[in-house]
Amino acid sequence: MARLHHTERARRGITRRGFFKAAAVSVPAAAAMVSILSGCTNSSKESVDSDPVVVEEDSAVNVTDSYTYVDSTYTAAHEWSLPLGNVLHPGEGTWIPVTTAGASASPMVKGSALSLASGTLFEVVSKSITSSSTAVIYDVRCSDSVYAWLELDLVTRDWWLYASSFSDGALTGETKTLWQGTSDYDPAPFACSGTKVVWQVQPSTSGAKTAEKSYCYVWTSGAGDATAAVESPGRFATKPSVSNGYVVVSPRVHADEGTYYGITAYTLDDDLATRVAQLVMPKGVKPFRASYVGGRFLVSVEASYSSGGLLGQMGTYIGTESGGFVKLDREPSEGGCGKGNVFVIKSKASYFVIDTDAQTYTGISSVDRTVDYGEYPARDGECTTFVTFSTVKDATTGYPATVTVRTFGL
C-alpha cells in the first residue's frame, strides 16, 4: 500500500483512511509523524442499517410516573479529597483519568490518574511532548492497561493524540502518535478500554473540510497499526462509549434519505468488526450521549423536536426497539452508566438510580456545598462501581476549596 509523504498529507488534509503505522517515541521527546496508509474500513459498515425507530410519545414507561420511589441505601464506599483544579473523566477500571491544573502557566495542565484502590493521585504526563510552545494537554483517558492524551495548540488549533501502555500509575512503554489533526478537524473524542484506544476523526463545522467523511479508529497497545473501523458520511452524533467489551458510536446512516443517526454497538475485541445492536433515531433527531448496558441502549436526547415521536423528546431512554423503552423525563447533562438492570443517570447535582427489574427508583445525593458546581460522573457504560466527583465550597468563605471523589457499589 502506498504511503503519503508528510508534506503531501499536510497539503491535502486527512483524506486517506484505513490503516496507519504509529511511530514510537519516548516521553518527553517530541513524537515522530504518523505515517498514514490507505485501506478499507471494517466489513461491519457494510451491514444493512436498521429502519428509524418512530413510536408514540406515550409508549415508554415513565420512571417518575410508573416506578416506585424507595429510600436510598447507597452510601459511599470511599471518599477522597483532591486539590482544586482536578477534573475526572470516564474510566472503566481501577484507574480514573484526570486532568490536573499545573502550578503555573507552564505546564498549564498535566495528565494524571486516580487509583480507586488507594485514592492516590498519580502524575502520568507532566507536560506536553509536542514541540509547539503553545500546545497544552487538552484531554486524557485511560484503562488499567493503556493511557491516552490529546494535546492542543492554543494558537493554531492543531492537535495530536498520543498513547502508551500504562501500569501502576505510570507509562510503561513507548509513546505512540495515534493521530495529528489541524483546525479543520475537531480534537478527537476518544476512550480507552483494556489495551485499546478508540477515537473519532471528524471535520470541524466551520473549517475547510466540512464535506469530508468521519471515521472511527481502534489501536491496540503494542501494535504498529490501527484499524479504521467505522465510516460516517457526516459527523458522529456522540462520543465513543466503551462498555464491558462493547463500543457504541453514532454515525450518520441512510444518508441518501436525510439526516439519521444510527446508535450502534460493536464488539471491541475484534476492533468493531461485529455489530451487536443498532438503534436508528428518527429523522433529524441527534442523540446527546449513548451507551450500552445490560443488553440495552442508554440514550439521552437534550432537546425536544417537533417530530420523531417518543425518541424526539428530551430525556434519557433505556431500551431497544424490540423490547420497548423506559424514560427518565429530565434534561440530560451527562451520559449514564449502570450494571445489569440498574442504571445511574445524572440529574442536576444528584443522580437517579433506576432498577428496571424491580421497577423502583431512588437517588444518590450530592456532597454538601456543591450546588453551584454540581456533581459529575467518572463512569460511562457498564460498571460495578460508580464514581462521582464534585467541587466543594469552603463552609466559612463560600469559595471553592477541594474536589471530592466518592465511589458507590452497584
Image (cartoon, grey):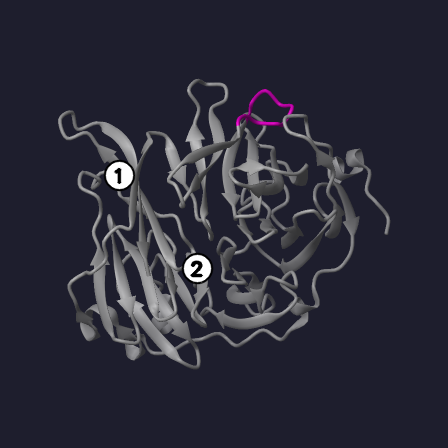
Vertical relation: 38 (above or below) 164: below
Vertical relation: 278 (above or below) 209: below
Q: Identify which amino acid the numbered label 2 is placed on.
A: Gly
Q: Residue tagged by mark 1?
A: 373
**Magenta segment, principal secondary structure?**
loop
| Dot 1 crowding, Cα within 10 Å, few <14, some 14–19, many 20+ | some
Q: Is residue 127 magenta?
A: yes
Where residue 33 appears, as percent x and y from the top left, is 73, 35
Where residue 301 appears, as percent x and y from the top left, is 37, 60
**SS at circle 1:** loop
Res 231 seen here: yes
Where residue 3 appears, as percent x and y from the top left, is 83, 45
Res 306 seen here: no
**193 on left or right of 230:** left
Give the residues drawn in magenta, as a range. 126-135
Q: Residue at 66%, 51% (x, y): give it.
A: 220
Q: Residue at 55%, 32% (x, y): give it.
A: 152
Query: How much space separates mark 1 and mark 2, taking CA atoms?
Result: 24 Å
* Residue 381 tag number: 2
Q: Residue furthest right?
A: 2
Q: Quadrant of residue 364?
A: bottom left
The mark closer to the camera, 1 or 2, is: 2
Q: Residue at 65%, 48% (x, y): give it.
A: 221
Q: Residue at 26%, 39% (x, y): give it.
A: 373
Q: Identify which amino acid the numbered label 1 is placed on.
A: Tyr
Marks counted in the figure total: 2
